Amino acid sequence: MKRYILLSTVCLVLWNCTGRKDVQNQDSLKMIRQVDFSHVKITDNFWSPRLDKHVSATLPVCINQIENQTGRMQNFVNAAIGKGEHSGIFFDDSDVYKALEGIAYSLINNPNPELERKADEWIDKIAAAQQEDGYINTYYTLTGLENRWTNMDKHEMYCAGHMIEAAVAYYQATGKRKLLDVSIRMADHMISLFGPDKRHWVPGHEEIELALVKLYRITKEQKYLDFAYWLLEERGHGYGSKGNEGEWDPFYYQDAVPVRDLESISGHAVRCMYLYCGMADVAALKHDTAYIAAMDRLWDDVVLRNMYVTGGIGSSKNNEGFTDDYDLPNLEAYCETCASVGMVYWNQRMNQFTGDSKYIDVLERSMYNGALAGVSLSGDRFFYVNPLESKGDHHRQEWYGCACCPSQISRFLPSIGNYIYGISANALWVNLFIGNTARLAIDGNDVILKQETNYPWDGLVKFTVASNRPLSKELRIRIPGWCKSYSLSINGKDIYVPVEKGYAVISNWKSGDIISLNMDMPVEKVAADPRVKQDMGKRAVQRGPLVYCLEEIDNKKDFDRLRLTASTDFKVQQKTEFLGEITTIQAVTGEQRLLFVPYYAWDNREAGKMKVWIDYQE
């Protein structure tokens, strides 16, 4: 049986810190290999409409803003000819790269000649803006190249990292390497300036580290992995404080101690997530177990003491990040969309090291709540900040001056297939429950894995695995931390199998079998850790992976005085033409009737108050 404890704002999350297998093969400490989303065709009724909206609404909004409403693309045009002003913020190049990465991911599973031509047009303009020595950054090109590489917090490496990620994605999608070659020249330019026996550098905003690992994997050039490692090792030695004019808060920039000695999260939430992703990727390839030990400590600090029930992180607007442990305000909660996406990225990597489902539990929580709330049901409006309470004055916008979140969503949504499956030496791993058909090559076998489900509204999931030859692997199916009761069957016959680190281990199965997992999905009243003062005397409502909230539009009478009690009765109802076909929860307490909707769906109707944490009376 699983053991559960109460997390900072999360009840019923799996806690299992048993030993790990550290070595899978000679080149990586990761025991599980991610199944790339290019092999996964999503077909379900929950995510498919969102992927359709990504193509029809999200990408067009990003393209229009970048080309017509802001000066982001014009900055590249101006930089290419060396004339004109730079418009916007100094890191705006990154939004172009992230949107381009989103285009590339969309093209992988949804070929679109017109969209590909648009991407090629952008890449031509980007390439034209590159300097002869390989440097590319429109802000410094247009405001004074003599000032480049003088301020570690001007995001030069951050922008370069997003360009590298876009370049790798577009090369994988199309085989075209123009942007990849631009990225290689920029990476070589940076390596010529920084490194052992050269200049010190601590990037103010992490991102380049994980991007360089992607570049290494594509090019097989060891120098890119070594440079990523060197950049991580630069932190915590005072180089940032000495190398910049003005203030440099080492805690805000994750520069207070060497990364291998980190014990608690601090500073800017998104920067932390990118740092930990970079550490995970480098640790796997450099066999640095000290990095992994540090991330184990950091994960405990983030999840047990600094995470919202929505999987959001970063409570403070002042630093877009963290304050004291258990300081989790609701109305003022920051919970940047990019940070929730970062939690998905990081927890997926941690799962690969350990095969422990607790990381996927957090990934799923962040994905379905904190990240998904970042985009409207129509796909064309975005949250930067995701509070857990609103007075009716917080709304999604089409774009932001700092537009990292819209462009982040544009690249995250089409890649969600990355997180469904994994493969290890002895097992095929099922992490998420999303209707799909995956075509895999495993140990020389052609394998088709089909998953059918109405998740997250229903707990029944059916799997069919077809292989051209017998497949000598276990099937490991995650039993979510929120699930208290479930059954498993093969071809209609109940089976009882061991559960290891939160995965049901099915050893005796054959090609063509229909394997069913049926999870009970009751409504839960979730209590916060008593050290979270803002949630004392309150409860949140959760069903399956979804956190629910109250909106004033559905509960207009005495909204500020609504409450739950120990005797509240919950009724679940499917609504096919309401907020994109959802399951609502009605809470009945005497004469009081409350209607809860999924948190991700709030603010898609008329303005009004909202809250996740509800007053509670025993």
Image: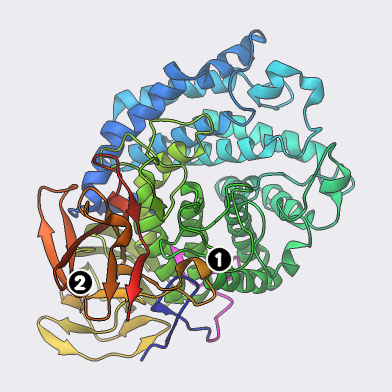
Query: Residue 522's image quarter?
Result: bottom left
Q: Is residue 25 magenta?
A: yes
Magenta region: which residues?
18-35
In the structure shown, which secondary structural element does the residue marked by tag 1 occupy?
A: loop
Residue 498 to residue 372: above or below: below
585 displayed left or right of 206: left
Label 2 environment density (alpha carbons within 10 Å; few <14, some 14–19, many ≥20):
some
Which corner quadrant holds the C terminus? Answer: bottom left
Residue beneath disc 1: 306
Instruction: Determine if residue 412 is in view.
Output: yes
Q: 295 and 439: which one is in front?
A: 295
In the structure shown, which secondary structural element does the residue marked by tag 2 occupy?
A: loop
Q: Are marks 1 and 2 in contact (CB under 8 Å)?
A: no
The residue under label 2 is which amino acid type? Gly
Residue 357 to residue 545: above or below: below
Q: 610 and 22: which one is in front?
A: 610
Q: Position of residue 113 (x, y in %)?
A: 30, 26
Depth check, mark 1 against mark 2: the one in front is 1
Q: Position of residue 375 (x, y in %)?
A: 35, 43
Q: Number of callouts in the render?
A: 2
